[in-house]
Image (cartoon, rainbow, N blue to C red):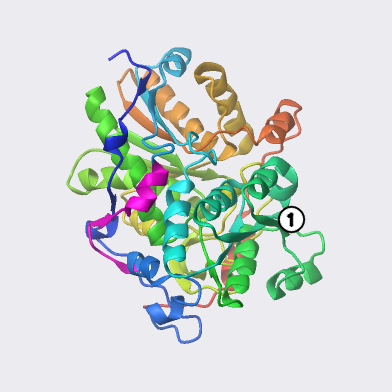
Amino acid sequence: MKETKILLPEKDIPRRWYNVMADMPNLPAPPLHPATLEPCGPDDLKAIFPMSLIEQEVSTERWVEIPEEVLEIYRLWRPSPLYRARRLEAALNTPARIYYKYEGVSPAGSHKPNTSIPQAYYNKKAGIKRIATETGAGQWGSALALAGRMFGLESTVYMVKVSYHQKPYRRVAMETWGAEVLASPTDRTQSGRKVLEADPESPGSLGIAISEAVEDAAGRVDTNYALGSVLNHVCLHQTVIGQEARKQFEIAGDYPDIIIGCSGGGSNIAGLSFPFLLDKINGRDLRVIAVEPSSCPTLTKGEYRYDFGDLAGLTPYLMMYTLGHDFVPPGIHAGGLRYHGEAPLVSRLFHDGLIEAAAWPQSGVFEAALLFAGTEAIIPAPESAHAIKSAIEEAVTAREEGKERVILLGLSGHGNFDMQAYADYLAGKLADYEYPDEKIREALSRLPVISR
C-alpha cells in the first residue's frame, strides 16, 4: 500500500467496547474501602458515580454495548485515521514501518472525549445536573466541558495550577463550552485549603485536583464526579481506538510488532493496546510499551501496592503502581502525565509482564516532537511526544539491527494549545529532572501496609 492515511467509514465505528478483564490471566485486586479495608461495593461508590458506570467498573463481560446516543456524538470525529509515517521513516532511514493512530481529530483535540461522552450520557440518564472533575494538561477538562455541553450538564473543572497558567487557551476552550474552571489547589474545598496552608505557592497536582473534585461531588446531591483516566470503565471506553486500529491494519495488510503509547493514568495506552492484547495472551509475539516522564516514573520506579487515588485520601485504596499519593511532581510540560498512580488494569498487566514501560526526560521528548512535526506536519501534544520518542528509539534499533519491524504509536492529541511548552524548549529553558529514588521511598513509607 502507498496510502498515507487509512480511513474507515462511519459504519465501522465500533458498536461495543472491549473489556480486557474477560481475558486477563489475573484480575486486578479489588478497590478497598479506606475505613474498613474491605472490598468496595456499589453502595460505596454511588454517592459520586451513576450505577451504570459502577456496573461497568466491576464487569467481566467481554463486550459492552455502546448506546446509540453516544455513537451519534462519536460520529462527529470517529473513526479516527491511522497514518503511515513514511516521511518519518525516511528521515530515520529505518526499515521499520511506523504507523500512528491520531486522536487529535476529536473536537477537544485528544482521545479524552471517547470516555467523557459516555460518562456524561450515563450521568444525564441518572438525573444528575452537574459534574465536577479535575484536569492536568487540560485535555480531560476540555473533553468533559464538551460532553457537558452536549448533554446539558453543568461542569466544574479543577485544573492543576501549573497547567492553568501554562495553558490559558485550554481554560478558554473549557469556558467556551460552558465550564467553570478553577486553578487547583483552591480555597473552595477543605482539601485545597489544607494544601494552601502548607504551601501557598503549591503548583498543584492531579492528586490534589482529584481530592477537590471528589469533595465537591460528594457534597452535593445534584453533582457526580467524572474521572478521565485510571478507572476500569474509562479504559473500557477508550478501546474504540484499538478496535478501529485492528480493522485499519487489516486493510493495510499489516500487523504491529510493537504498540507504544504515553501513559499517565493509563487510559491512552489501554485504549490503543487492549484490543490487541488478547493476541499476546494467546501467544503472539507482541510488545506493548507504556511511556512516561522520568520526572514522574510511576511504572519504572514506583511500587505495586494499595494507595489512594488522590492526595486527601477521599478515594478507595486502589492496587496499582504508585509513587505515593502525596507525590507532587515538578511542573513539566506534560501535565497529563503528572499523576502518582497507574490504572489498576494497566498495573496488573505490567506486573504480569504483558506490558513494558519506558521513561524519558522532557528535552529528548521535545527533540522527538520537533522531528515528528517536521516530517509528519502535526505538532504533537507533549504527552503524545513521549510515545513518539520511544517509537523513534525502536525504529533506530531496527535500523541498527537491519530488521523490519512494524511500530504502532498512539498520537493521543495535538499540541496546538501547548505552544508555551514549545517556546520554552526552543528558547533552551527546559530542564530535565530525574525524580530522586529517596523521595519516592519517603512518599511510599507513609502508606499503610495492606496485604490481601
* 28 on left or right of 172: left
Q: Nearer the viewer, residue 131 or 367?
A: 131
Q: Nearer the viewer, residue 251 or 403?
A: 251
Q: Which kind of residue does numbered mark 1 sit on?
A: Pro
Image location of residue 195, percent across then percent down: 74, 68
Residue in view at x 57 percent, y 76 percent = 218
Q: Nearer the viewer, residue 55 or 424?
A: 55
Image location of residue 417, percent across then percent down: 65, 36
For residue 330, above or below residue 155 = above
Image location of residue 45, percent across then percent down: 45, 76
Magenta extent: 58-74
User: Can the viewer see residue 40 in this picture?
Assistant: no
User: Can the viewer see residue 386 in this picture?
Assistant: yes
* 159 on left or right of 304: right
- How many tags in the picture? 1
Residue that label 1 marks: 203
| Residue found at the very far bottom of the displayed protein | 36
For residue 169, above or below residue 215 = above
| Residue found at the very far front of the displayed protein | 152
Disc 1 packing (10 Å; few <14; some 14–19; many ≥20): many
- Viewport quadrant of the C terminus: bottom left
* 58 on left or right of 431: left
Q: Secondary structure at mark 1?
A: loop
User: On the image, which quarter does residue 371 sit in?
Assistant: top right
Image location of residue 92, percent across then percent down: 46, 16
* 262 on left or right of 131: left
Residue 391 counted in the magenta span? no
- Viewport quadrant of the N terminus: top left
For residue 123, above or below residue 139 = below
